[in-house]
Amino acid sequence: KTHAQSHEEGRCRLHPQTSDKATRARMPEAPEANNVPSDPAPQTTGFVRGFKFNLGHQETDRIVDELEQVCKQVLQSAGDSWMTCTAASNIMCNNLGYEDQGELEDAIKCDWVEFIQSMPHLETKIQDDGSYANGMMVFRMKPFVPVQDRKMFIKSFTVKTREDLWRVCHKAPSAVMEFPEMEFEIGADAKRKIDSIYNHIAGAVYNLSMHVSSLGMQLSEDHKDKISETIHDLNVMLDVEKSFTVLIHDRTGISEIRPDDDVSTQYGGPAEMDPLEMEELKMQEMLQAINEVDGGNEAGGEAPPDADKETVTEVD
């Protein structure tokens, strides 16, 4: 088999089709290339603890991104309220075109509650406040660790086997992923990225391919040759013919690699505030100002009687 045939078979096996509604919204496939990685190591159920779904699946990436947008909308409208997993699945199905939660779970090949529990930027609990959601699993976005309690760092991990490509990397908006053996890096893109190491690299291949395809004649032949060589080298890395190092440079101290076995961390000075963190702080200040107006804090600034009561976003 050629590498292209092997890769296509692997893509079909690892990326099973979802419904027509979900498929219509997918990103276009990357341009055909002569140098593509062979079939990546099949993901073993439970290999990455808590990540039994295929995080390298393009549709899963779309679901993760949409879930984060939903969490941000809840934060803007209801502060740090908890949201039921059922409510979230209803919104996700409506936004992404899935028929119901069962079809959504077919796309991620995982139970929806388990999927929520596996997200490193979400916190979950069983609601116990006596509300209509009592006994149900609820979640919300984790607050950032205060910047004064964080340090900037460089995380280092050596990919030795193809199974290591399925480690999950939570790349902060300001973080840079470096591959020193290639002198290549994936820069900061002002967006949180939670994906397998495999898909981080495959995404770089896609972006470079699209760059050449879109600019076409505007690039010199020498420039095209150098980009093609980089694409080839990245694809060779995905075959793991030899070990290579992944470095995460994060001045905000937020990024993670899971599981963290054999991941070393070199700490630096005090961390910087992440752009998303500043956005959330501004949002909290705005919500606090609204609550002060609507909550009747005129009398000595006292909080409403039920201010400390935990609530659940009622959007089921």
Image: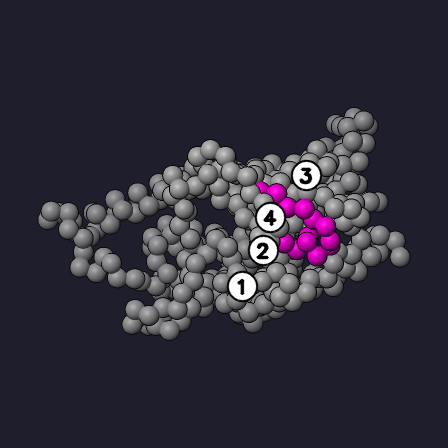
- The numbered mark at residue 263 is 4
Q: Is residue 279 left or right of residue 154?
A: left
In the image, residue 219 lies at what x, y percent?
Answer: 76, 28
Of labels 1 and 2, earlier in sequence is: 1
What whole-number distance in Å separates the C-alpha atoms at marks 1 and 2? 16 Å
**Residue at mark 2:** 259
Which residue is painted at 55% across and 39% down in the image? Answer: 266
The residue mark sitting in front, 4 or 1, is 4
How far apart, in angstroms, are the residues tagged by discs 4 and 1? Answer: 24 Å
Rounded to the nearest angstrom, the CA distance separating label 3 from label 4 is: 15 Å
Q: Which amino acid, by three-letter code, is at mark 4?
A: Val
42 relative to 273, above or below: below
Task: Name the amino acid type tagged 2.
Answer: Pro
Of the residues under marks 3 and 1, which one precedes in the sequence? 1
Write down the residue under mark 3: 179
Quickly name the residue at label 1.
115
